[in-house]
Image (cartoon, helix red, strand yellow):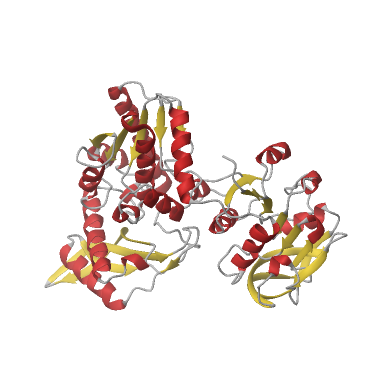
Amino acid sequence: MNREMIIVLDFGGQYNQLIARRVRECNVYCEVHPYTLDLEKIRRMAPKGIIFTGGPNSVYLEESPHIAKEIFEMNIPILGICYGSQLMAYTLGGQVATAPVSEYGKTEVEVDNTSILFEEVSPSTICWMSHTDYIAQVPEGFRITAHTPVCPAAAMECAEKDFYAVQFHPEVLHTVEGMKMLSNFVKKICKCSGDWKMDSFVDNAIEDIRRKVGGGKVLCALSGGVDSSVAAVLLSKAVGKQLTCVFVDHGLLRKNEGDEVEQVFGPNGNYDLNFIRVNAQERFYKKLAGVTEPEEKRKIIGEEFIRVFEEEAKKIGSVDFLVQGTIYPDVIESGLGKSAVIKSHHNVGGLPDCVDFKEIIEPLRMLFKDEVRKAGLELGIPEYLVYRQPFPGPGLGVRIVGEVTAEKVRMVQDADFIYREEIAKAGLSQDLSQYFAALTNMRSVGVMGDFRTYDYAVALRAVITSDFMTAEAADIPFEVLQKVMNRIVNEVKGVNRVMYDLTSKPPGTIEFE
């Protein structure tokens, strides 16, 4: 398909994927690639624009990431952000040096509204700075278009060649008018019309799947969450009964969730597919016995998933493809290029050699969560399923801090059910991006009636986020939290204390492990 595209070249910045997310908000397709992407490949991709990300390095050091000067001779508009701005200056003959004063956090920036990049932006606007180096001298042919008291070249441009650079981060929400700037670059400088829509994505994804699968058999890892559900329906629309969905009930699902998944996708559901439910609770509990380290738990659960699929594939005969509901944030957090691994995801990174599939199909790999939901609605999936609370692949295994046991699973299932029920009663479910109960490994003394207890503490979590890359704790009314607490300590055996987690992301993650 020929569609407008912006390419983000990643130089190790922490906000690299967030840039892509913001570009897509402009209805323009965007992909993130390592800065080492071959220039010939870039030419073949024919992007309407290129964005350089930030990064932790100093551009004037030999070991720092650099890029061939020829990229500036391709007649493609380029926007450099933070390290990307310094890279542009350095590569084109300007000077970059250690700044006399570093800038971190929200900063008032004076901008030149004659620049297309800053059209309709306030002359004095709040931007997010995060830099120690700065552009000491702009290259020949460039002019300065923004400044702060300690950063004389907070933005620069060579409008004739469509080169633009900003020292701050327009992609983060802390830059108040950042979306205006990115939209100006994408729409006015790159001349993108905005043809990235979910209806076209769905149609093209179905077409691509049919072409790839042909007459082959497909096995789908169905968890019942939004991601795997949308992936399963995409495959069902594309290849029908060539698809077998294996739903593994690993004993780490939310209360009653296994039956709910079967009701939607099983024989009594509305989808043209083969459905197999595998009740493997005891198998997973046995493997997880005595394991407390989060990454080890994730890997065990992921490995067991693979083994279950391998076994089911043998039962149904030859299987050519495995479908997974991997989405962009999974890829990001598992490490892309030189980016740090935050946590591993069992649905990222391919399969062990012993698994007999030709290829993995990940139709949602380049979508963010909100885009997945839009695709789900386009496919006609019921809203209650599309807007179901996000749930990690390892399930409650990463919402139980420490060792996983059947008894702990029962506690967190019951506590989470109560929490979700009361949130719904209070009319808050649509206002929260994600909320759940987790079981800590802390035990403390309590008093229940005339009896002394020594039981577990439950932590409640609720966040507000637009992209799941950053998040803030939700301000839930105290009376709601108090009601949840009363019900949990009275109804959930083994729990005598309830806490509310106020931590944002970063420094925390949305999940506990």
Q: Is residue 282 above or below residue 133?
A: above
Question: How many numbered discs, if any?
Answer: 0
Q: Is residue 359 above or below residue 95?
A: above
Left or right, 62 with respect to 272, comes to: right
Left or right, 504 with respect to 439, comes to: right
Q: Is residue 229 above or below residue 420?
A: above
**Snapshot quadrant of residue 145:** bottom right
- The residue sitting at the right extreme is 140
Residue 209 versus residue 96: which sits nearer the camera?
209
Which x, y percent locates residue 285? 26, 41
Which x, y percent locates residue 384? 29, 56
Which x, y percent locates residue 205? 46, 40
Residue at 50%, 58% (x, y): give it. Answer: 469
Residue at 25%, 74% (x, y): give it. Answer: 482
Q: Quadrant of the N terminus?
A: top right
- The residue sitting at the top extreme is 317
Viewer can see residue 455: yes
Residue 52 versus residue 263: which sits nearer the camera?
263
Which x, y percent locates residue 267? 21, 37
Viewer can see residue 351: no
**Snapshot quadrant of residue 22:** bottom right
Left or right, 289 with respect to 486, comes to: right
